[in-house]
Amino acid sequence: MRPIEILITSDRAQVSAKLADNMAARALAEMLPLNIQMRDHLRQEKTGVLPSALPGGDRQAEFSAGTLGLWGDRDFVIYYRAGHVPAPGIVILGHVQGDLSLFDNSDGVTISLRRAD
């Protein structure tokens, strides 16, 4: 099965991402299209609340720049720097392909997520 590709768009830029092959990422794809208000957290990530919970899955503490993650069951996260999170960790939802400068600032941003067709 080919990975699902999505577009992440703001009023300033657009990037694409490939979703992971897991239940949480597939459930996210079923929710699309979505608009999410994101806020900056710890100058390493943008985070926003999904309209409903996603299923859990394997969690990990480490992430790279560009990782899409799920913290808890409703917090959608885009990491623009590499690092790690405390237990229980994040479910990997996918990875951004391209320039992360859209996210690398302390400002909030509204993004839209949709399938790339």
Image: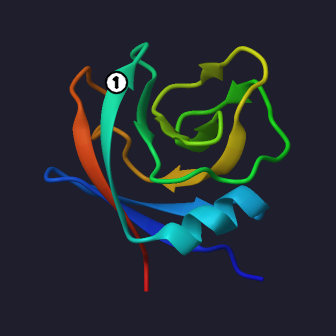
The total of numbered circles placed on residues is 1
Height in image: 105 above or below 52?
A: above
What colour scheme governs how the chains and residues are painted in the rendered image of this protein?
Answer: rainbow
Q: Is residue 13 at all visible to an observer of this figure? A: yes
Coordinates of residue 71 in the picture (x, y in percent):
62, 33
**Residue lying farthest to the front in this orientation:** 52
Q: Is residue 103 at all visible to an observer of this figure? A: no
How many C-alpha atoms fall within 10 Å of the one at disc 1: few (<14), some, or many (≥20)?
A: many
Task: Answer left or right for 115 relative to 84.
Answer: left
Quadrant containing the C terminus is bottom left
The answer to which image quadrant residue 45 occupies is top left
SS class, disc 1: strand
Task: Answer left or right for 26 relative to 29.
Answer: right
Coordinates of residue 51 in the picture (x, y in percent):
45, 53
Coordinates of residue 90 in the picture (x, y in percent):
70, 34
46 or 12: which is nearer to us?
46
Height in image: 23 above or below 101?
A: below
Which residue is painted at 78% across and 23% down in the image?
A: 88
Q: Amino acid at mark 1?
A: Asp
Task: Answer left or right for 36 relative to 107.
Answer: right
Height in image: 81 above or below 9?
A: above
Height in image: 106 above or below 74?
A: above
Quadrant containing the N terminus is bottom right
The answer to which image quadrant residue 82 occupies is top right
